[in-house]
Amino acid sequence: MINLLCTYLRPYRGQIALVLVLLLFQAIGNLYLPNLNADIINGGVSRGDTDHILRVGVVMLAVAGLLGLTAIASVFFSARIAMGFGRDLRRAIFTKVETFSQVEVNQFGPASLITRNTNDVQQVQTLVFMALTVIVSAPILIVGGIILAVRTDVPLSGLLVVVIPLMAAVITVVMSRAIPLFQAVQTKLDRINQVMRETLSGVRVIRAFVRTHHEEVRFDAASRDLFETTISVNRLFALVIPTMTAILNLSTVAVMWFGAQRVDSGALNIGDLTAFLQYITQILFAVLTAVFMFIFIPRAAVSSRRIREVLETMPLVKDPEHPVQPATSPQGRVEFRDVEFRYLGAEEPVLRDITFTAEPGSTTAIVGSTGAGKSTIANLIPRLYDASAGSVRLDGIDIRDMAREDVWREISLIPQKAFLFSGTVASNLRYGDENATDDDLWRALEIAQAADFVREMEGGLDAPITQGGSNVSGGQRQRLAIARALVKRAPIFIFDDSFSALDFSTDARLRAALGRELGGATVIIVAQRVGTIRNADRIVVVDAGRVVGIGTHHELLATNETYREIVYSQLSEEEAAA
Amino acid sequence: MSGPDGRQPGATGGPGASGNPGTSGVRGARPGPPAGAPSAPAPGGLGARPGGPGGRGPGMMGMGLPPAKSKDFRGSSRRLFARLRPERRRIAIVLVLAVVSVVFAVSGPKILGNAINIIFEGVISRQFPSGVSQAQLVATLRSQGQDQLATMISTLHLVPGSGVDFGALGGILALLVAVYLLSSVFAWIQAYIMAGVTQRTVLRLREDVDRKLGRLPLRYFDEHPRGDLLSRVTNDIDNIGQSLQQTLTQLITALLTIIGVLMVMFLIDPLLAFVSLLAVPASLAVTLVIVRRSQRQFVAQWASTGALNGHVEEMHTGHAIVKAFGRQRQAIETFETENERLYEASSRAQFISGIIQPAMSFISNLNYVVIAVVGGLRVASGQMSLGDVVAFIQYSRQFTFPIIQTASIVNLLQSAVASAERVFELLDEPEETPETSTPQAIVKAGGAVTFEDVSFRYQPDRPLIDDLDLRVEAGATVAIVGPTGAGKTTLVNLLMRFYELDGGRITVDGIDTRDLTRDDLRRQFGMVLQDTWLFRGSIRENIAYGALDASEEQIMAAAEAAHVDHFVRTLPDAYDTIIDDDASNVSAGEKQLLTIARAFLADPPILILDEATSSVDTRTEVLIQRAMATLMRGRTTFVIAHRLSTIRDADMIMVMDRGHIIEQGTHAELLARHGFYYDLYRSQFLEPLAEAI
């Protein structure tokens, strides 16, 4: 945590120094004000000296006003430092995540990355703000108070040696019990979240199976569990403040008792005794405050650890130091040479010995059963993952030697999960080319068989799209994703099982239109349906991470057992029926 | 010598003078330095305000809390406090305890002052020779012209020649110890009870919301984003709990202290009391101005937090697309803009709300000087004794603190009320139409289903189904075909009464489904959809979802019938493998097999099935196909069909287009009609088939 704080607070060190000076000034002022208070009473009120009261009153107001201004100034800078720190940290995390490959994103999970960027940053940011306003001024008040106390009476100050460790001991005991409880509260909150999420996402199934009551019992268990823990945390803390106040109050009694003896023996005058009382309560109070702030430290420490995990992750896919310039007029030839891919630390590779070439102007299809590794092959081309052995080449250049931006420029990807961004139909379509005209967009929509429904949508191209594209159907989403890729017009098209949500006739019409449109492009299709790929120039059959056959539909049908099995499992009944 | 003109007892505003228990700052109400009041913080310990640092970390500054923009602050806060009603007995106890605490707090400085007086008297007594009586002393002083001193001494209890009366001092200090300890004990009991009060209130609220979710119509879930609902049940309720925990006890004590101190002040001197009372409207005005502004900034801060959250979520979820389309630069730019906006709003919010403390301190100092001036004048004119002025000043210090405290509590409460409002909004949503009061009993239906003149629409202005008539014999199969669309969900919604009909009726075994309880009705149905739903738990528990009392053998048998037994046994923990909806160790097809097993075990007379499409690999698809065929045997089945064989073999085909049912009949009838189905059949099945072979 210290590390993180040091790094990200460095740009603010000037302002922090300023805040420290302001706080020091405030602490001195706060120690000085009581003297003025006393002076008003002693020198003015008790003597009926109105002039004195007014004189000192003006000084006191001036000091108080100045103190107020410094307090405002220090809050101003503290707020800007703490929030600036948070902003910088968020930026660092977001920028870092943008360099991640899919491997790292999946490793953390998008949800966790979001929490880390918002919630966790807030925790640390809060600590910084607290530190700048409270924790830092506490030591100043303590030291100042001790100096004044010792100056007033040394033997009486000995009391502090007893009281401060006593308070520290109480706090330590409480904290050691509270921290595990706080952690438990977090976990139990997570559990509630999870049960609730399931209840909401499965509401149809729950009601269909008449399990509402059962879910309620499950929720109650989680809820009660959280209740038990929070109540014990709060009861524990219910004890802290009265205990601390008791210690504080009893020490004032002790000061009175021992102080009276010192006064009686003439070693201390009575005015100093009351002043001493004030100093000692101030010191103890500052100790109490400071120690209480430490409550936030364990939470912030947990958060910083989570943030650092993100910041310190080295993405597996990196830009080379000296990227090879791509060809000025890219052909779009994609070549896999003995490619192997395995997840970090995995025993078995997902893919091995993958070798094939997708030529420009032709369609290459990749088929195989679930888990065979088809999508992984598709993801290797845009460097969402990097091959662990062998190479993927673009126009003869190993893509790992190219800047990723250059690789992406040549690829139009239509992912398995057609993900749309919130905005409008047009803003989504222009994702790949900001300068595309409306005509370009409509053309792409026509080819993607999406023009009809976009026309029917209120607003047409400007029709709103909600996050993730949840306001259009799955099939429409896929067609919009295809149109988006068409607008980009890169030389390589990768369709990663992109037709699954389409019914057969739309699928057929779409493929026919694409065939006309993508004449010169390199088309790579990952698919499950035989109908989708049977016209491909080249079909790569993948099974258990290996290529088990390459050829045309007819060639493979004649020679390849795996392919035949796939085809017949889909067509046999219809065949029989035809 | 620290003679008679030495400092007056408590002159420096000894312990308790400022009455600033300051612990509020620690409780996260506001992060301002508790020593913000110009006088050194004194223990004022008697008024210690108990309360933990909240169940969960810093809700301070409202960061990360849901946006607070209360629509009806007064109504919602009244309702929130009404929820404390079941705890009223405990709250009454707390109130009594608080009154006692406040009485102690108010009397504390007085007792301490007595102690100082004794020391003072001892010190003065020592200065005079023993054997002289107090009266003689006063007379001597007067004769020396020291009238003022003489007057003062005449009010003291002096025993010339003796020192501090440790016996009396000890007695007073013992009393003080007792008062302090008792007040701490009371404070502890208060806090202990209040922890229970708030947490139980929160627990009840959470349970009420959960029950409410069970009674809301499906329509509500379809129309509201899940994230928002989730946030209401967790974040908002959590926020309420945290704020209540922090504020309730403080509020009670603060208000009582204000009243108590004010009473004492009026007893001492009405004029001065009136003067210090002026600090109240001044403080309130300043607080109101600041809180209103900071509230606006907080709202802006929460809005930006939301926007930033949304952007981050979207970019991370669509990570691959952002990369593949080379849009990181734009993603980062948008992020920067939102991030900057959040920074501006939040630092402004922190700054503005941070002004309260210094401003209040200044008002308190101003008040102090005014009291000193007015008090001094009154002492000079003999209208008031010095001791009273000193006491008064102490009390005025004790008086300003709870005002500052109340200001920050109001700030915190605003956030709690905003959250409460969101929760109440949910609790006020209209519920499902009530069950019939005279439900018909049905244990296991035969399975005959009819639709009679059924009309239904999601939106009043968009007709979807009108006058649909359909008669399905028990055990028959109805195939639903047509391009992708909302058709199947609508069917499920109507059959299972997730949505209510706009007209006509649906019967099961001749009984109107509205004459059955929803639970009884739904027990007749089994559902196997493509978008499966599994909850986090073992595979065994998931299969047994529809039949809690199923034996191990029955579960295995169901798994076997669903052709998923083999797969489960290849998993390291077999039936104990923990899965959930996002499980990556189980493929989509396998999940569907598990839901088939679930349906087998539940053994319902009527089924709603969804045939697998292409995102399931071919081998699994074959398994699903076989399992479904077995499952359908002897049950009335509505199947969303993609396969020709299923459609052709169905007893009845419903052709849907864009959610409407446009044709219905048997395969032969529909083909003969040469309508939509005929075209669909040719384009979807015959042509691709011809192409493929």
Image: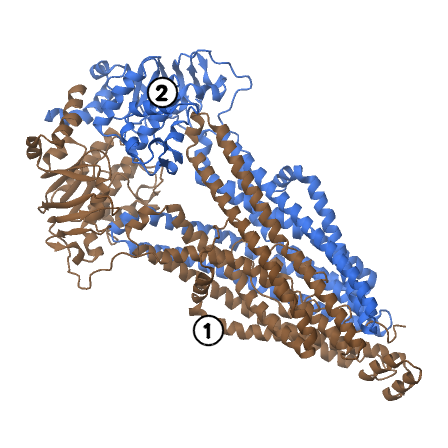
Please give the name of the residue rendered at 61% of the width and 44% of the height, measured from the top-left corner.
Answer: A82
Q: Secondary structure at mark 2?
A: strand
Q: Which mark is residue B151?
A: none
Tag 1, which chain?
B
Quarter of the rendering containing residue B253: bottom right
Q: Dot 1, how many residues are within 10 Å of its Cα: few (below 14), some (14-19), or many (20+)? A: few
Note whether B429 is above or below A402 in the view shown. below
Residue designated by label 1: B89
User: Whole-percent x and y of residue B6?
Assistant: 85, 72
Q: Colour of chain A?
A: blue
- Say which amino acid is labelled 1: Arg
- Colour approach in the figure: by chain
Q: Is residue A53 visible?
A: yes
Note whether A61 is above or below B318 in the view shown. below
- Mark pair 2, 1: CA separation: 72 Å
Q: Secondary structure at mark 1?
A: helix
- Nearest to the observer: residue B508 or residue B77: B77
User: Whole-percent x and y of residue B236?
Assistant: 45, 54
User: Whole-percent x and y of residue B644?
Assistant: 14, 31
Q: Is residue A570 left or right of residue B205?
A: left
Please give the name of the residue rendered at 66% of the width and 37% of the height, measured from the top-left corner.
Answer: A11
Q: Which chain is brown?
A: B
Residue designated by label 2: A493
User: Whole-percent x and y of residue A533?
Assistant: 26, 20
Q: Is residue A365 left or right of residue B174?
A: left
**Image quarter (top left, top right, bottom left or bottom right) of the N terminus of chain B:** bottom right
Q: Dot 2, how many residues are within 10 Å of its Cα: few (below 14), some (14-19), or many (20+)? A: many
Q: Is residue A186 left or right of residue B273?
A: left
- Nearest to the observer: residue A414 or residue B540: A414
